[in-house]
Image (cartoon, rainbow, N blue to C red):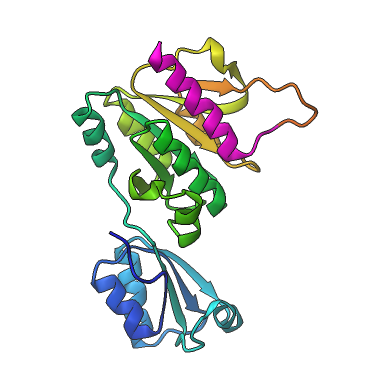
Amino acid sequence: MRYEELTIEGRNAVLEAFRSGKTIDKLFVQKGCQDGPVRTIIREAKKHDTILDYVEKERLDQISETKKHQGVIAYAAAYEYAQVEDMLSAAKEKQEDPFLILLDNIEDPHNLGAIIRTANLAGAHGVIIPKRRAAGLTATVAKASAGALNYTPVAKVTNLSQTIKELKEQGIWFVCADMDGETMYRLDLKGPIGLVIGGEGDGVGKLVKENCDFNAAIPMAGEIDSLNASVAAGVLAYEIVRQRMQ
């Protein structure tokens, strides 16, 4: 189900969006704006664990499309987020070992869209992103996914490390993309698996990496030392596919 709007402006519109159950990725509130209606919107945002960003009026004016924001602008997801349980259920229905792709620090919507596209083609049962330090499901992401977002579920979780711990209890093990890890061809990547990919700058966060079972490195012979995040996800995802087909 696709939402009709991505940017929601004005106090009544934003409040109605929360109350109607729309998934709001982020709420911008003008600094110093604390009257009754705005406080009500902030309470709704906190109730839904929405990211709150207090900004100057000039910032709101800059991102506003209507120029009638009334001190609040909300970003809604272009597509609904799935639940991690939905992905596990899909794997069970197909009688396949779960194959999940988890992303940390992927803030470029083009990279996110490309990874969702790869996830679909590689047969992954879903993509998991954190609430913070991540691009949301915007129209740009949908376009970059080349339609894959219509078929591959994406879940947004509050704590990626905690999610990994919970999935481990269900028999899934995790491999983290890391240039200092073991060469991917030497690792057994079969069975229920979660592939963890980090952003090109900060990579996978320390705590997330510590909760992974293995670190996998992609062999590289060039003068530079890293691949684009979506390319790295593709290389590792298809090594998992190759091993599963053996």
In magenta, the rendered stretch is 226-246
> Outermost residue toward the right?
223
- Front in this rendered view, residue 113 or 146: 146
Image position, residue 134 (x, y; %): 50, 51
Image position, residue 60 (x, y; %): 54, 79
Image quadrant in which the N terminus is located: bottom left
Query: What residue sits 59% from the left and 27% below the top?
Result: 178
- Front in this rendered view, residue 208 or 188: 188
Q: Residue 172 vs residue 219: left or right? A: left
Can residue 135 be seen by looking at this rendering?
Answer: no
Name the dominant secondary structure of the magenta segment. Answer: helix
- Front in this rendered view, residue 206 or 221: 221
Image position, residue 32 (x, y; %): 50, 83
Query: What residue sits 32% from the left and 85% below the top?
Result: 12
Q: Residue 135 vs residue 99: left or right? A: right
Residue 169 in magenta? no
- Among the 4 quarters of the image, the one containing residue 4: bottom left
Q: Residue 223 vs residue 170: left or right? A: right
Query: What residue sits 77% from the left and 32% below the top?
Result: 224
Can residue 9 be seen by looking at this rendering?
Answer: yes
Image quadrant in which the C terminus is located: top left
Q: Is residue 126 above or below residue 92?
A: below
Residue 233 in magenta? yes
